[in-house]
Image: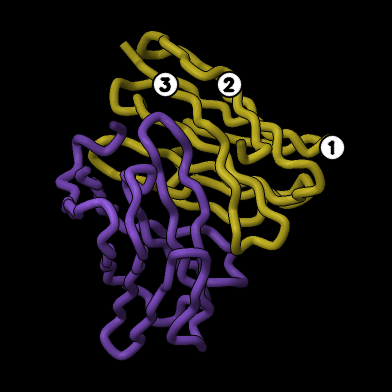
Chain colours: A purple, B yellow
Amino acid sequence: GENVGLHLPTLSVQEGDNSIINCAYSNSASDYFIWYKQESGKGPQFIIDIRSNMDKRQGQRVTVLLNKTVKHLSLQIAATQPGDSAVYFCAEILTGGGNKLTFGTGTQLKVEL
Amino acid sequence: DSGVTQTPKHLITATGQRVTLRCSPRSGDLSVYWYQQSLDQGLQFLIQYYNGEERAKGNILERFSAQQFPDLHSELNLSSLELGDSALYFCASSPRGIEQFFGPGTRLTVL
């Protein structure tokens, strides 16, 4: 995949189990935090975002938790499926500065059958 | 399919050359973003355009430039190419800046 040159942390889970992917962000002034999924050979795909004044947001099978005290973000995927296998990136946005995404390193999620 | 298109899909060229990467945003999106994904740097923001005007710049080299045309498509120009410029280049578009839709990318190989 595109990220093999980086030392990506890997999370291996059994199909049907819940996955928790963690991310530490750097800028306490960021307004939004976003999770992206990138499958091999494809561009990043938006999963879910959370505004900085929230601590939890739920989507379809996914939940994002934000802990601003320790600058930590997590993505929980319920009932992980083989199709969830991908690299997951957290990203932060400081609005007003062009809304550029600052990406984290990424985590490789491997779903075992 | 995100609705963002990028051409070409692959590009192989030599050091010192110049290439142009093209991006068509989703219908209605005024913002276009360019990102570089390399093996050692991960995903890095390069530059953003909004309705034809440059809005934000990231770690974009002086050898690189971009523009957004009246029909909202964008081009990223890379000149005096070096081996280290080999990477995936992604374009993204957005209706409001938070949710960005990425294209399939252009894989650039500099030999």
Q: Residue at x 33, y 43 (%)?
A: A82
Q: For mark 2, what is the residue? A: B20
Give the Cα separation between the discs numbered 3 and 1: 26 Å
User: Is residue A33 placed above or below A111 in the rendered structure?
Assistant: below
Say which of B26 and B53 sits in front: B26
Q: Name the residue under label 3.
A: B108
In this rendered view, identify the residue nearer to me: B58 or B1: B1
* Viewer-closest of A102 and A48: A48
Residue B16: percent from left, percent from top: 40, 14
Secondary structure under tag 1 reads: loop
Q: Residue A44: give x, y in percent of width and height.
A: 46, 45
- The three-letter code of the residue at mark 2 reads Thr
Which chain letter matches label 1? B
| Residue displayed at 45% across by 34% down | A42
Which disc is residue B70 wearing? 1
Q: Is residue A92 left or right of residue A23?
A: right
Mark pair 2, 1: CA separation: 18 Å
Q: What residue type is labelled 3?
A: Leu
Q: Name the spot of residue A14 as percent of width and height, x first.
A: 20, 53
Left of A43 or right of it: where is A2?
Answer: left
For mark 3, give the secondary structure: strand
Amino acid carrying mark 1 in the image: Pro
Q: What element carries label 2?
A: strand
Among the two numbered marks 3 and 1 on one chain, the one whose residue lies closer to the N terminus: 1
- Residue A3, by quadrant, is top left
Q: Which of the two discs, 3 and 2, labels the residue nearer the N terminus?
A: 2
